[in-house]
Amino acid sequence: MTLPSYLEGAWRAGAGAGTPVADAVTGELVTRVSSEGLDLAAAVAYARRTGLAALGELTFPQRAAALKAAALALQERKQELYDLSARAGATRKDAAVDVDGGIGTALVYASLARKGLPDHTLIVEDDPIPLGKGGTFAGRHVLTTPRGISLQINAYNFPVWGMLEKLAPALLAGLPTIVKPATPTAYIAAHAVRVIADALPPGAIQLVAGGVPGLLDLLGGQDHIGFTGSAATAARLRADPAVTRRSARFNAEADSLNCSVLGPDAVPGEPEFDLFADALVTEMTVKAGQKCTAIRRAFVPAHLIDAVSEAVEARLARVVVGAPGAEGVTMGALVGLAQRDDVRAAVTRLSAAGSIVWGDPDKVEVTGADAERGAFLSPLLLRADDVDRPEPHEVEAFGPVSTLMPYRDPAELTELIARGEGSLAGSVVSADRDFVRRVVLGAAACHGRLLVLDRDSAAESTGHGTPMPQLVHGGPGRAGGGQEEGGLRAVHAHLQRTALQGGPEILDSIVNRDMQSGEQR
């Protein structure tokens, strides 16, 4: 069966053989993905015509109500998404990160909009700014909905959360969305769209299963492109004429070599030592390490590296790899055999700069499934004592892989962190406030988010790898140079800021006329 796309309010299957998508656990065919023969130009026109009109009729609180209704519809049927996620190799815990995380993100945005956005279709950012001595000429800024669409191009690892964290701000901003999910998990994203489509205004969401040839040719200065995936693909999209010539807004969130730092004070026996080891293993094994925020470089004081390695190895020994749902399994499969091959190739490059101290890239004991038919891989802990080698700072193995590296002092540490050339997330695990301050101030320019973890905050901490909708998600350099989420900042990023000039009374009548007359648009 070919996975259908949701276009112009109907489900339509593409032609041709399509790209086969296999079950990550059994290797059996799940579906085929093809957009061949689909009229993407008609889908864009439908979004501009029907979607913009339907959303334009709604005020911010009304859009928030629609978003909440969609999230609650998913909440009622999330077990269906858990079941589908298991076919992509996700354990129940993994699926909750994606599904529950996505639902929670949408609900947070709905709440933020109800509390923080006006009962209107535009946002007035400031009071009149005097521009003359007599008080008869002033300026102010307003935010309005562009006459465009939002195209989101998503990664395979979070088919639900990745879609909802982009959809929520676009919907609140009044922009209809076309979703292009990654092929390996497109069937999960498509099912989520089936659940929420009826809760949203007509044209507010469409989904293309498969490639989108020619679609970027239809986009320009009124449109928004949101991308999550590899840095190489982000670079190609950024170079497209839709961005370079026609000035479509482009936001990229790419993979990065995120790091975690253990402070010199966190010796064995101190809570921070155990917090660091626990966090590292969690980031290696949740979603089988297929997270753009996972810890790839673990920096530890040189005198503690042996103790840290032993502690992490002991924890990894308790990890059970196997079929999601099988008794005792704590880590599932990678999304597919091709991804496993990619990770193995990356590990070969990384191990040339050091050694593998835990796990075997070619062999793993699997519970409840066949180790070769499924895309299973052992957690792999590497150690690189020669921190000047380029590989740990350049090569990302997008799976259950992390590399331990020693540092001598905060100055060297800051230089090592910067060699990652920009990251989404970093963390510092220490109770030494002076050390934390030096690391954070030295590393902030290289990160979109930094977590400080100690014994006092651990109980409520959301962890190294969990973006929160209230805070920005993105990072400089290799991480894509963009920002997603961040509360209402994300909504504002989809709107057009316009400076108005004129007499104060005229300006006031412009921004208030619709509400005074009882109109909603």
Image (cartoon, rainbow, N blue to C red):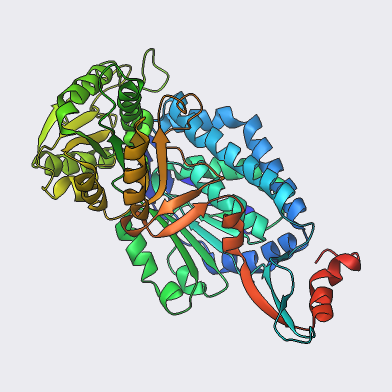
The residue shown at (40%, 32%) is 453
Looking at the rendering, which quadrant does residue 476 occupy?
Answer: bottom left
Residue 375 image point, x, y percent: 28, 32
Residue 101 placement, left or right of 75: left
Up the image or down, 457 lies above or below 445; here it is above
**Where does the image place residue 138, in percent across and percent down from the top left?**
73, 81
Tell which of 41 and 339 is nearer to you: 339
- Place residue 445 in its image quadrant: bottom left
Residue sitting at x 33%, y 28%: 285
Q: Please indicate, yes or no, whether residue 289 appears anywhere in the rendered image.
A: yes
Instruction: Give the camera-side residue of 240 and 443.
Output: 443
Picture quadrant of residue 299: top left
Q: Which of 271/99 is in front?
A: 271
Question: Image quadrant for the C terminus?
Answer: bottom right
Coordinates of residue 345 in the picture (x, y in percent): 17, 43
- Pick out the residue farthest to the right: 517
Q: Is residue 290 visible?
A: no
